[in-house]
Image: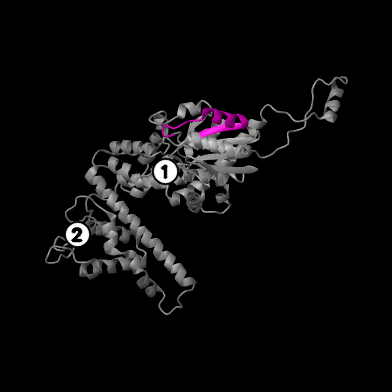
């Protein structure tokens, strides 16, 4: 990447904002002031100066580090002292031009021996230099222009070195004890570090070929609070579950506040009489008992069709979290029919297992297996009408796309009328509402509809309830 330090700073801060990190203009200027106070040749001091001024949450640090490495790379090209030996081809070829398998290539075996020594010693600087050299030799497949981590990891196979490393450090010791478990964990962490270094080096080389901006858009995932629920993996779902719990508590408290608003408890006769003594026995001010606190009830109605199947994971996360905040939570799923799925959400159940059981056992399909909101609402109203009472908050989750089928607006209006509150969370971007078969506006006129694709939008929805 070329350009002045000012260009790099401007591009770096702009990409941080695009990736979802909240960096204000004032914080960008603070970063400039901090950079003036450190040695620009000391890359880690430069990284620390930027991080201290623009990173606000620990969850943002991995995104920051990835972008910093793209805009302020440690090396350019092959890097000083790490260029592959031109007399030493990256791969030994057969007579027919095909590469010799890594396990048979003496050059690869020599590199793997070198990697084993670095993993054994824990030399991080040496491991970084080795990763750069390994990518230069094995990161690009002959005949292809791009760079990949897979070729490097396949050639080096760090996970196959575990037995050799354990034998080196546990010589003469009993196997299977605490020492082996500690050593195994240590080497696994070092192997993960090597894989991360390889991935970072591959990103750096791709950025040199195609530009840092384009590489950042492909390599950097948004922070957790702005990650679309539909794009979350298993590890990210676990992190989302931890974040959803406090939001569920806030959602429950908002609903309790709304139902208590404007209500007073029963008249407290003794306190009223006592207060009237100050006004000559005339009860100018009445005193009331505080309303008896109670947890509200919640009914969740979730679209489980293929178009929003990933969003249904979020529904399960929210349902798990809300179980502890409400006196009663009943969850229902629908496609073109509806069925209760509360039984799958027992405390401690795995989200993926719950989804698999729901798909296999729940009666969600009527005829076509395609979304039909109108018929699903009719089935729900016929089978589970008693689920919605004046104490119930109704939460509908779905994209409001009914494949041009019936909408059953009177049925939904009756359901919302029986509930104390009714809200609709739609995972589609608002710009796509009312396009194609979307019935967002007709349904939104009956049940207030909110765009909700990530934690940030869920937080905004909860705050709006206040």
Mark 2 Cα within 10 Å, few/some/many (few <14, many 20+)?
some
Along the viewing direction, whichever of 39 and 191 lies nearer the viewer: 191
The circle on residue 306 is 1
Left or right, 154 with respect to 437, comes to left
Secondary structure at badge 2 equals loop
Q: Residue at x 19, y 61 (%)?
A: 90
Mark 1 Cα within 10 Å, few/some/many (few <14, many 20+)?
few
Along the viewing direction, whichever of 362 and 85 lies nearer the viewer: 362
Compare marks 1 and 2 and give the one earlier in the sequence.
2
Left or right, 259 with respect to 57, comes to right
Q: Is residue 92 magenta?
A: no
Q: Quadrant of the N terminus?
A: top left
Q: Position of residue 366 (x, y in %)?
A: 48, 42
Q: Is residue 129 visible?
A: no
Q: Quadrant of the C terminus?
A: top right
Along the viewing direction, whichever of 358 and 59 lies nearer the viewer: 358
Where does the magenta region start and end? Answer: 402-426
* Structural distance between the alpha carbons of marks 1 and 2: 49 Å
Left or right, 288 with respect to 321, comes to right
Q: Which residue is mark 2?
A: 84
Q: Position of residue 274 (x, y in %)?
A: 85, 27
């Amino acid at each position: 990447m070329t350009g002045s330090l000012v260009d790099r700073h401007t591009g770096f801060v702009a990409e941080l904002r695009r990736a979802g990190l909240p960096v204000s203009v004032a914080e960008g200027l603070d970063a400039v002031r901090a950079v003036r106070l450190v040695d620009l040749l000391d890359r880690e001091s430069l990284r620390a100066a930027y991080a201290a001024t623009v990173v606000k949450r620990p969850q943002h640090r991995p995104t920051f580090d990835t972008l910093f490495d793209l805009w302020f790379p440690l090396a350019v090209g092959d890097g000083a002292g790490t260029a592959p030996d031109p007399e030493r081809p990256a791969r030994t070829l057969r007579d027919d031009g095909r590469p010799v398998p890594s396990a048979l290539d003496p050059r690869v075996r020599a590199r793997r021996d070198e990697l084993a020594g670095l993993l054994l010693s824990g030399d991080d600087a040496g491991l970084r230099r080795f990763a750069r050299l390994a990518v230069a030799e094995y990161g690009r497949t002959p005949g292809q222009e791009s760079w990949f981590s897979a070729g490097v990891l396949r050639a080096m196979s760090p996970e196959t070195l575990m037995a050799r490393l354990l034998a080196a450090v546990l010589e003469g010791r009993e196997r299977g004890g605490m020492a082996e478990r500690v050593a195994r964990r240590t080497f696994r962490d070092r192997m993960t570090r090597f894989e991360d270094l390889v991935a970072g080096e591959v990103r750096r080389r791709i950025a040199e070929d195609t530009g840092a901006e384009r590489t950042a858009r492909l390599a950097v995932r948004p922070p957790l609070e702005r990650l679309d629920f539909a794009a979350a993996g298993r590890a990210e779902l676990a992190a989302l579950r931890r974040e959803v719990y406090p939001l569920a508590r806030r959602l429950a408290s908002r609903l309790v506040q709304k139902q208590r608003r404007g209500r007073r408890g029963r008249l407290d006769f003794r306190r009223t009489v006592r207060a009237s003594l100050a006004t000559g026995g005339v009860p100018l001010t009445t005193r009331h008992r505080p309303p008896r606190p109670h947890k509200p009830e919640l009914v969740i109605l979730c679209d489980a069709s293929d178009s929003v199947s990933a969003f249904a994971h979020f529904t399960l996360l929210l349902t798990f979290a809300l179980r502890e905040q409400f006196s009663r939570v009943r969850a229902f799923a629908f496609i073109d029919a509806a069925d209760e799925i509360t039984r799958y959400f027992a405390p401690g159940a795995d989200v993926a297992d719950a989804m698999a059981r729901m798909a296999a056992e729940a009666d969600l399909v009527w005829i076509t297996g395609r979304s039909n909101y109108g018929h699903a609402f009719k089935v729900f109203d016929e089978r589970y009408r008693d689920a919605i009472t004046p104490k119930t908050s109704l939460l509908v989750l779905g994209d409001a796309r009914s494949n041009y089928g019936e909408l059953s607006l009177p049925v939904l209006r009756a359901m919302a009328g029986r509930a104390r509150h009714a809200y609709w969370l739609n995972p589609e971007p608002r710009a796509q509402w009312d396009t194609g078969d979307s019935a967002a506006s007709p349904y939104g006129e009956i049940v207030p509809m909110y765009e909700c694709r990530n934690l940030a939008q869920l937080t905004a929805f909860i705050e709006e309830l206040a």
